[in-house]
Image (cartoon, rainbow, N blue to C red):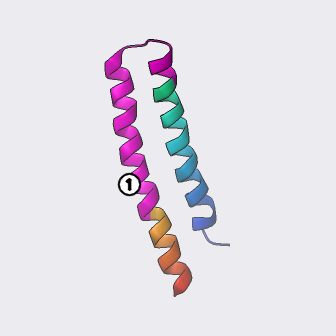
Amino acid sequence: MNFFDYLVPLAIAAVFIVLCLGLWNMMRGGPGNVSQQFMRWRVLLQFAAIIIMMAAIWFAGR
């Protein structure tokens, strides 16, 4: 097993957790700037997750 076997699910879980936190804050009527910050973090984590997945695919093919 390589470290991508642990890193890919961790990245996906991080995106899911931040998404849920942002949605929870919006549904409970929390401050809009906090929800906006969570959504910005979600976009950055999604980018990182995609890069990690592409690297895992690339290294698996080598």
Tag 1's secondary structure? helix
The residue drawn where x is 63% and y is 65% is 5
Question: Based on the displayed image, in which of its 4 quarters is residue 9 positioned?
Answer: bottom right
Can you give x and y, in whole percent of width and height, for residue 49 in the image?
46, 56
Q: Quadrant of the N terminus?
A: bottom right
Magenta segment main secondary structure: helix
Dot 1, crowdedness within 10 Å: few (<14), some or many (≥20)? some
The residue drawn where x is 49% and y is 36% is 19
Can you give x and y, in whole percent of width and height, for residue 4 in the image?
57, 66
**Residue found at the far front of this picture:** 27
Q: Which residues are magenta?
A: 24-51
Comparing 2 with 13, the one in front is: 13
Type of the residue with mark 1: Phe
The residue drawn where x is 45% and y is 70% is 54
Q: Is residue 1 left or right of residue 57?
A: right
Q: Which residue is mark 1?
A: 47
**Residue found at the far right of this picture:** 1
Can you give x and y, in whole percent of width and height, for residue 45 in the image?
42, 47
Comparing 6 with 61, the one in front is: 61
35 in magenta: yes
Can you give x and y, in whole percent of width and height, for residue 12 in the image?
55, 51
